[in-house]
Structure formats: structure tokens, C-alpha cells
Amino acid sequence: MSLIVAENIQKDYKTGEVTVRALKALSFEIEPASFVSFVGPSGSGKTTLLNLIGCLDKPTDGKLKVADTDVLHLDRKQSASFRGSNIGFIFQDFNLLPVLTVYENIEYPLLMVQSVPASEREKRVTALLEAVGMIEQKDKYPDQISGGQKQRVAIARALVTNPKLVLADEPTANLDHKTAYMVIELMKKMRDEFRTTFIFSTHDQKIVGEAEILYTLEDGELTGRQVRGGKGNG
Amino acid sequence: MGNLFKIAIRNLLRYKRRTLLTASLITVGVVFVLVFISVSGSFKNMMVGSITDSMLGHMQVHRKGYVASIENLPLNLNLKPEAIMRLENILNKQPEITAYSPRLKFGGMFSNFVETTNIRLNGIYPDLELKSVPLLASRVLEGKKILDKGGIWIPELLAKGMKVKIGDTIVVVATNKDGSVNGKQFIVAGVLESATGPGGRDGYIHIEDAMEVLRMEGMEISEVAIRLKDFGKLNTFSKKLDDLLSKELNKEGKPIFEVHTWEKLSPFFNIAKMIDVMTFFIKLMLIAIVLISIMNVMIMAVYERIREIGTIAAIGTLPGKILNMFVIEGFCLGIAGAVIGNIVGIVLILILNMLKISFNFGQQQGLILHANVNPADIVTISVTVIIVSVIASLQPAFKASRMEPIKALRHV
């Protein structure tokens, strides 16, 4: 069964009197444990699409199911709950909380979103710190680590709740090439380890090659789908 | 909840200077209010205590209509023996009363055989009077603190003006209610310190001497001063006594008695009320300071952390938890301001008491300011500051909790 089912989803934005169609009747399905990338130039609709899949926004028209849930009819609180249980986010600017240490940043969703008991939290956070290679830096604050390290922490934070899906909007945009590759490799490794679906958007052609399924977006339309092999391809 | 506090405190410490300034502002407000309430409250209590315990008593009972003419000390409005008996029967049954003192008041002439002046006199039973107004004895600056028959306590200013000393013989002349004049010699037994307020410059003689001067055949009294066991129950008991005495009617079916608390008998009550009004406005100022400073700092905090709010909302933090996060920040600021303010305020009050600052109030000179810190005031101020801090945080916190994560994440 598909993890994400999108049927003719459309997104319009109103700017004064003008309505701009950001997404034009997109339909696709994504299977569990996929490693998917949406590529396209700036303004092609990548971020808008990821926001819809991530339940941060709602399509103007069409049907969208994520983890077998019709996300169109979730209210504000239900959306937050759904995101907390099913979706992990990795941001371009890392978006770690500056007042929390590396350990506390990863622990945050378990503590503040899912209320997981302390012993279980410690087990899961420590396992992820080791998996992303940040155990030595666990007591450091975000301003004391590098960009690549921050993104590793962000990946650990996205995975700590065992989500079905991790969305990463331009996760390597603020990283150098070497670090970017390391981050993508880490995401792949995590996908293999936790069987989590990773969807990321990028316009970096070198990183694009790492995706196992590649969707191309142009002016809000899906113009291509390439399957490049790998595990869990639908 | 502990984690929300941890995050809130870390966020406050993140902007140390701003947090320090806001907490300082609240602290200054709390200190100002606490010191003002302590000083003005202590002054008020001291003056009320002085008036009630050395002159008026907590409350007084008169014949109906007497208080309206009290300045003339009308002898024709005294309580007669039957009324006195009925009154005493009622007063004796009241467990709230610790003592009461009948007084016969009149105006007369005071002569040292060389000069003559006017004087207001209270005829009293000394033992009952000293139980009802226990500070009266402390006002005796010279002479005996017990008033015997044939003796007179005269006010300090009169003693100085008339050059009269302890042991001197003087004459009191008074007109009785029939219009005839009578006089009686007295020995000056004590000189009284003047006090501010009605009766503060009265003389005292034994009630039987007063009856003799006024040629009364039967006992008559002008008023009964009452002292309660618990001053805090003054208004409740006043109402109770008023109800009881209103059932005592004369032959015409009209009430015989009227009851007045010290508040109705002393102009100082208006000053006390003004102090209360000023205290109220000072408290309002504190509320305004806390409200504006906390709201300002929380609005800034929300504005500066829009992307963080977007992040935590995106990863699934419920709006209620985001609201709590910011409200707790305001709460912590309020707690810090209240605690530091109370500590600094108490220290300042202790210093003020150590300095033994003196002041004058009317005729009373060199009163030492002794400010008391009332625990109830500390609790009231602290609770007010904390509640206002939470209220001030609500609007910015609500705004943060209602933020659309997608818009917040886009914020630059």
C-alpha cells in the first residue's frame, strides 16, 4: 500500500486580485521506505508540494492521503498531532533550537510532542546520536557545532519519533559538496536502518543523482519521473 | 511542565540584558509599593491606635442626637439613669467587648486664681477609662497616672499657658443644664500630652466630681466609650450593637441610642481613607509597570523567535504547549521581579527602621517611624505581580500559538 497518494492536487495562491497556480493537478504515489527527490528550478513548486505532503498547508483542490489519512480534513490541532506522529522535518537552515543542546534538540519531539518516558527517550536519543556520529558533541549547543553537524542533528531529530516519512526541503543548500554528500548518504543509511521514507527537494544536480526516485517539477507541473534503482522503490 | 520551565528560563537568559532590565523594572515597582504600603500602613495604624486607645475608644454610644451637637457638649442630651441601666444591661452581655467607660462631658472655665480660660472636661471612672483607652495613662507626662477624686488631669498646653504645676489648686466653674453656675476646687494631679483629634486637649476629672460641679442629683452620662477584644471585628460588632440598641425605644417610640465607630467621630478617618486611596493608585501603577514591561518583552520575544515557533509547530508541538511556553516565560519574569523586589523591599524597610526617622503629627512631636512588613501585603503584591505577568504574556503567547507554521518558517 502506498504511503502517499496524491490525485490531481492543485494549489493556488492569491496575491491581491491575482491568483497564482503554484501546483497544477499533480498525481503520484510514493511507497514506504522510498528515497525520493523532487527537483526543479526555483519557483517550480517543490517547497509548496513538500508543505502539502507535510500537512503544513492544504491543497486548493484534489485528494491527498498520507499514511492512509486524508490530510485535507484535519484541523489545526489534528494536523499538528499527525505531523508529530508520522512526519519528520529537515530544514535547509537546520532550525535547531538554540537554547537546547544537541541531545536536547533530538529529545525535544519525544518530550514535547509525544511524551515518551525518560528511559525510552534516553535509549532512542543515544542510539540516534551514535547513528549520526554526534555522540561526542551531545552536550554542545547549536552555535558550537558546524553546519554539517547541525544537519546531522536535524536528521536525528527528524527520525527520533520513528516517523513513516521524513521531508527535507533543500537539506544540503547551506552545506559544501563534501558535507552535502555525507548528509545524503546519512539519510540513505537511516532509510535503510529505520525503513523510513525520505523525500527531499533539491536543485543541486550532483545531489539529485543520489535519489532513487526522481520527480521533476517545472512551473507547478510534474514533467518527469525517473526510477534509478535502490531499495524500496515503488 | 518542568521542561517547559527549563526552556522558558533558558530563553530568558538568552537575552540577558533585556531580561535584567524588565526584571529590574518590576523589582523597582515592587520595592516602591512594598515600602510605601509598609510606611503609610504603619503610620495609619499608629495614628488610629493612638486615637482609639488614648481618647475615643473603638466606638461610642450616645443619646440619639448627641453627636450632631457634640461640639457644644449639650447637657440636655445626656443619658438618664434608666437609659444607662438599659444600655449597661446590653453591653454586659456582649462577649466582643473587653471594657467600656461611661463619660460625663462638659465645658467649663478653668481658673488659677489669676487667670481664667475655658476647658473641656471628661468626668470618668478612672479604672474603667484606663481599661477602655489604655494609652491614656501613657499620655500623663507629669504627676500620677491614677486619677483620684478631687484631682484633675489637665492638657499640657493649658498647664504651660496658665503656668500651673502638679499639686496646684485650681477652680473649675461650669454652668449646669438649668443655667446656674457652680464651681469646685481641684488639685492638679497630672499633665496630659496633647493628642491630635477630638478630645486631644480635654481635661479629666472623676465622674462623681463632675456630677458635683454640674449639681446633678442622679447619674447622667454623655457617652460610653467601648473597647473591643478584636479591633478587626469593629464594623461587624458595630452593626450588631446598632441593631440591638435600635430596639431600645423611648416613650415616644423613638430609638434612645446611637452608635458610632471611631471612624465617624474622628476627622483622621478621612486621612486614613486618603492613604488607602493613594495605596490603591500606587498598586495600579505597579500593575501598569508589570503589564507594559512584560507585554513589551514578550511581544519582542515572539517576534524574534518566529522561525523557532514555526519549527516547533512543524514538528508537531501542539498550540496549547506553545502558548504555555511563552506564558511560563512571563510567569518566570514575574516571579523573579516579585521575589527580588520583596527581598530588596524588606531590606530597605529594615534600614528605614534602623535609621529611626522621626516625624510630627499635629500636636504629637517626634514620633518614630516604625514601618512593619505585613506578610499579607507581601503575598498580595507577589500574587498581583505574578497574575499580571501571566495576563500580560497571554496575548503574545496566544499569537505565537496561532501562528501558521508555514508562514513562520518563511519569516526572515
Image (spheres, coloured by chain):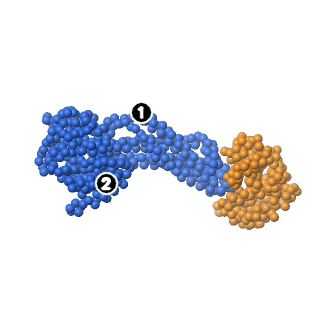
Chain colours: A orange, B blue
Looking at the rendered structure, the kind of residue marked 1 is Leu
Quadrant containing the N terminus of chain A is: bottom right
Q: In the image, which disc is placed on residue A193?
A: none
Is residue A76 at least partly visible in the picture? yes
The amino acid type of the residue labelled 2 equals: Lys
Chain for disc number 2 = B
Q: Is residue A35 left or right of residue A108?
A: right
Measuring from the top left, give residue B107's x and y in whole percent: 19, 45
Is A36 rendered above or below residue A139? Answer: below
Mark 2, residues whose alpha carbon is within 10 Å: few (<14), some, or many (≥20)?
few
Between residues A107 and A203, which one lies in front from this camera angle? A107
> What residue appears at the point 15 percent right and 49 percent down from the top-left corner?
B216
Q: Is residue A175 visible?
A: no
| Quarter of the rendering occupied by the C terminus of chain A | bottom right
Q: Which mark, residue B355?
A: 1
Q: Secondary structure at mark 2?
A: loop
Left or right placement of residue B331 versus residue B246 in this view: right
Residue A93 in percent (x, y) is at 72, 48
Q: Image quarter for residue B137? A: top left
Q: Residues within 10 Å of mark 1 (few under 14, many from 20)?
A: few
Give the mark toward the camera: 1 or 2: 2
Q: Secondary structure at mark 1?
A: helix
Which of marks 2 and 1 precedes in the sequence?
A: 2
Rendered view: B135 above or below B4: above
Residue at which label 2 appears:
B93
Rendering coords of residue B36 (x, y %): 43, 42
Q: Is residue A36 above or below residue B187?
A: below
Residue at x 47%, y 48% (from the top left corner) = B380
